[in-house]
């Protein structure tokens, strides 16, 4: 693992371990299931994850109103009770709205926030404009900020050079790197990993990222197999690399199943339902039609192979 240098920002040192980009439980009418969100948060805390990330992409954040996002923050922060870090997603289309959400998150007791680039107009923004967006947000509210790099979702790729600039901004403490580009991850890690936490966002690249020195990860699969991932990291850091590799191979097979590859949102909620945990409906529009009986059986089989059932 990379040794934390003298320049590492204090909060960055806390970004170590498994972080969960939480699904948002919905009822049969596609309304926010508040009781379900409490139960799900409590279960995740019991799995010894380092942090939870409500209002995430996995949580269908783009379909949530500002009021629902604030309600989720309150629920998750309250249920976590300081036992695990809470990093709500506060990205929005305007700098002003992000600042407003960050102010709410700080007052509600969040430990940090996750902010993605503006998700409309994509590469119409210059790098200087995106830098100004983040710098303005960081200067406006006294709360640690994790940058989310996922061009597949946001439409804006953060270059290595821009990430270097952002790493020098006060209050920017980490990057959730979800490009799927291991070469870029390695290069960025070598340039900013002594200042901020580089967190892997792709499940299949977890072990390789740990080898490069990543302190942790933010993975969609952590919604359904958090303890497996916690154990994998503990094996790796404890020097039991064979066990870590075995768990990673199980993870690869799990997220490589047909249903998961087709629609991980539906897969996560389907598995949570099998486990007796709240997931519920997906708020329309959905990414795919409801799974067939055969697809559900395949998903259950993959969960069984992971030891979840």
Image (cartoon, grey):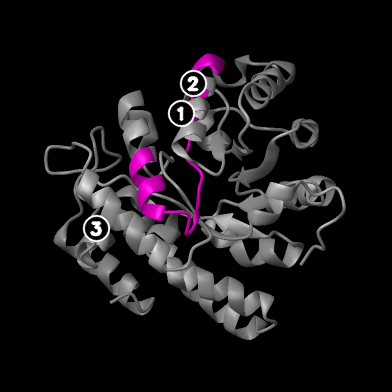
Mark 1–mark 3 Cα distance, whole angstroms, equals: 32 Å
Q: Nearer the viewer, mark 1 or mark 3?
A: 1
Q: Total marks drawn?
A: 3
Give percent across and percent down for residue 151: 57, 34
Q: Are marks 1 and 2 in contact (CB under 8 Å)?
A: yes
Q: Is 95 a magenta residue?
A: yes
Foreground disc of the pair 3, 2: 2
- Residue 270 got which mark? 3
Q: Dividing the picture into quarters, in which one does residue 29 lie?
A: top left
- Quadrant occupied by the C terminus: bottom left
Q: Please indicate whether residue 136 sits to the left or right of residue 195 in the image.
A: left
Residue in the image at 19% along x and 64% along y:
294
Q: Taking 111 as reference, is 227 left or right?
A: left
Q: Which residue is mark 2?
A: 100
Relative image position of residue 157 (x, y in whole percent)? 64, 32
Nearest to N terminus: mark 1 or mark 3: 1
Q: Earlier in the sequence, mark 3 or mark 2?
A: 2
Which of 106/9 is in front? 106
Quarter of image, res 237: bottom right
Whole-number angstrom distance, CA of label 3 to CA of label 2: 34 Å
CA gap, disc 1 and disc 2: 6 Å
């Amino acid at each position: 693992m990379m040794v934390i240098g003298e320049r590492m920002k204090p909060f960055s040192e806390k970004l170590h371990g498994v972080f969960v980009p939480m699904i948002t439980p919905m009822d049969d009418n596609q309304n926010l299931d508040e009781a379900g969100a409490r139960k799900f948060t409590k279960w995740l805390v019991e799995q010894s994850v380092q942090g939870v990330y409500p209002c995430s992409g996995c949580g269908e954040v783009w379909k949530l109103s500002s009021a629902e996002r604030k309600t989720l923050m309150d629920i998750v922060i309250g249920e976590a009770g300081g036992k695990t870090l809470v990093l709500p997603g506060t990205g929005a289309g305007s700098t002003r709205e992000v600042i407003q959400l960050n102010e709410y998150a700080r007052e509600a007791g969040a430990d940090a926030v996750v902010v993605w680039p503006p998700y409309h107009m994509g590469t119409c923004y210059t790098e200087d404009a995106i830098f100004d967006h983040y710098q303005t947000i960081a200067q406006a509210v006294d709360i640690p900020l994790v940058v989310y790099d996922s061009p597949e979702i946001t439409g804006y790729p953060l270059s290595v050079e821009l990430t270097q600039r952002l790493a020098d901004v006060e209050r920017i403490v980490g990057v959730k790197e979800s490009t799927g580009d291991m070469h870029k991850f390695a290069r960025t890690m070598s340039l900013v990993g002594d200042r901020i936490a580089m967190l892997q966002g792709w499940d299949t690249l977890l072990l390789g990222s740990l080898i490069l020195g990543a302190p942790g990860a933010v993975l969609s699969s952590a919604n359904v197999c958090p303890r497996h991932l916690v154990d994998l990291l503990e094996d790796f850091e404890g020097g039991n690399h064979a066990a870590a590799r075995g768990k990673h191979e199980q993870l690869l097979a799990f997220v490589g199943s047909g249903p998961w590859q087709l629609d991980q949102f539906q897969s996560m909620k389907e598995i949570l339902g099998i486990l007796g945990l709240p997931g519920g409906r997906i708020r329309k529009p959905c990414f795919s039609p409801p799974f067939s009986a055969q697809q559900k059986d395949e998903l259950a089989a993959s969960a069984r192979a992971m030891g979840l059932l």
